[in-house]
Image (tube, helix red, strand yellow):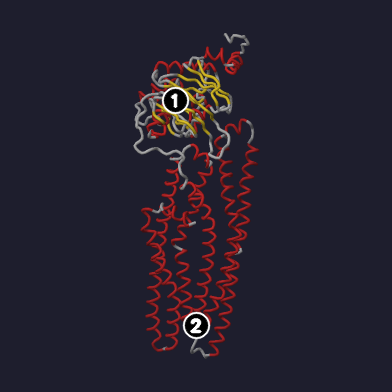
Amino acid sequence: MNGTVKTLLKSVRQYKKPSLITPIFMVIEAFCECLIPFFMAQMINQAALSAPNAMEHILTYGGILIALACVSLTSGALAGKFAATASCGFASNLRHDLFYRVQKFSFANVDKFSSNSLVTRLTTDVTNVQQAYQMCLRIVVRVPLQFIFAVIMSFVINPSLAWIFLAIVPVLGAVIFSIVRYVMPFFRRIFKKYDALNNSVQENVGGIRVVKSFVREEYEKEKFDKAASEVRNDFTKAEKIVGLNAPIMTLFINFASVLISYLGVKQIIGGAGVDFTATELSALITYGIQVLSCLMMFSMVFVMLTMSVESARRITEVLNEEEDIKGVENGVQEVASGAIRFENVSFKYAKEATVYALSDINLDIRSGETVGVLGGTGSSKTTLIQLIPRLYDATEGNVLVGGVNVKDYDLKALRKDVSVVLQKNVLFSGTIKENLRWGNENATDEELIEACKQAQADEFIRSFPEGYDTYIEQGGTNVSGGQKQRLCIARALLRKPKVLILDDSTSAVDTKTDALIRHAFKKAIPDTTKIIIAQRISSVEHADKILVLDGGKIIAQGTHEELLKSSDVYREIYQEQTKIKSQGGER
């Protein structure tokens, strides 16, 4: 827990001053509130004892009471202002730190946390921690101080009766502890179920067109209701127990007040109102209520802190996560060429995994070559190309680009010159121009148009009423799959990379458009190394080299003609796709 607090407090930064000022004003407010009942009793006593000069005492003590009330009000208002500033600023910094931390994650780090869980941590969990922080600044400081002041003043007025309050405190403490201990497991489970709820919502909204196409609205409703019900049920169970807190506290407060009133009246009658007066009894009851109210407030804070502890733990998990891939200091800043070399490369996704996704990969690709990659589902085609820009690091062996080990490059420099159009590339909300400039933020309009022409996207863009200023919805939901792929290819071309990797990125375009894209590459970027993962042999048959993967290994490589003669797997794929069963594999 200490480590969690230290990690979170690093996000306070520029809000240290209001965080430190708030408790000071809370001390002043608590002190004033505890003095008010005492001076109230003194005013009544003095006025009763000196009837002729009663007004003088009333004015004197009345002035003191007004001053205390004004100071208490001002201190409380200032404490609220500074606490709000500090807690909101702290939450803002925390979200900033979480978001920036996620940006440094490698694919392996992202795999560890689901996207829905990260969203929950950035929103719900940060809000819980923000509320807990504000409580710590105000109530957690005020409650113990007010408790101590009230106890001291109670003993000042009547020590024998004040012990009643202290005797009740351990009992109430035990009740609070039992409640919190019981509800803690519920709150731990709730946040995991929040992740499942967010996942249900995100999947439904993101795939709403698929849901409607397959008429699966009822199924999605049932899935959502189940996730929402699980969150509700756990919250209901926890809140039922927490709800016992207030009536139990009220019972003890009333019991203590009745007991003190009974014993106090006996003392007043027995002492004829000399040693202990009715006004002092009233003040004592007020302090008693303050003592027990402090315990009630403390129990509420304790419950809130119990919830926030789990949120704090989930946040620090992300903040303390070590990025799997780190750039080196003074790394190589420029990729000399598009030459690629794999030296005895093997890879597995987790250290504890027993099965390798890639095994014994040895490969040489000359700069400017076009390389096709074929293989069945699960053959690790995507995994192979993700090692080139260091989206993952090889478990064994070395990957070299431009004659330099990828681990020796500055990460930004490497990924700038190795441009990847991923299998699940997405477009972001904004205009087509804004999306394209992800590839090069300083690209001119002419460069945007040229890249789109090479990607065969210019024609359909100009068919839109707004042209290149057409607004793209989040995820590119208002353009077709083929249009999305071509825009992503154009975005990658704007980087003017040394290596261009297309991970099945023309699967949604027709064969004619696919051929035009390949022809444009050959003409416009002849010196760029092009690696094309494809399902259609027609997309790679003109490549300088074709790799056939199976089970994470390269089982064959060569030109189209060579593989037709030497590889049974390649020949089978070719014949199946062309619907020709000739023995020689000719068209």
Q: Secondary structure at mark 2?
A: loop
The residue depicted at 53 percent of the width and 81 percent of the height is 161
Q: CA distance from mark 1 to mark 2?
A: 87 Å
Q: Residue 490, can we see it?
A: yes
Disc 2 target residue = 158
Q: Residue 494, can we see it?
A: no
Between label 1 and label 2, give the one nearer the viewer: 1
Q: Amino acid at mark 2?
A: Asn
Closer to us: 201 or 299 = 299
Quadrant of residue 201 within the rendered picture: top right
With respect to residue 229, does 50 lie above or below?
Answer: below
The residue depicted at 46 percent of the width and 56 percent of the height is 5
With respect to residue 546, does 94 lie above or below?
Answer: below
Q: Secondary structure at mark 1?
A: strand
Closer to us: 156 or 3 = 3
Q: Amino acid at mark 1?
A: Arg
- Residue 340 coordinates in the image, percent (x, y): 43, 25
Disc 1 target residue = 341
- Residue 68 coordinates in the image, percent (x, y): 39, 73
Query: Residue 16 bears which disc, if any?
Result: none
Question: Disc 1 or 2, which lies upstream in sequence?
Answer: 2
- Residue 130 coordinates in the image, percent (x, y): 46, 54
Q: Are marks 1 and 2 in contact (CB under 8 Å)?
A: no
Closer to us: 106 or 356 = 356
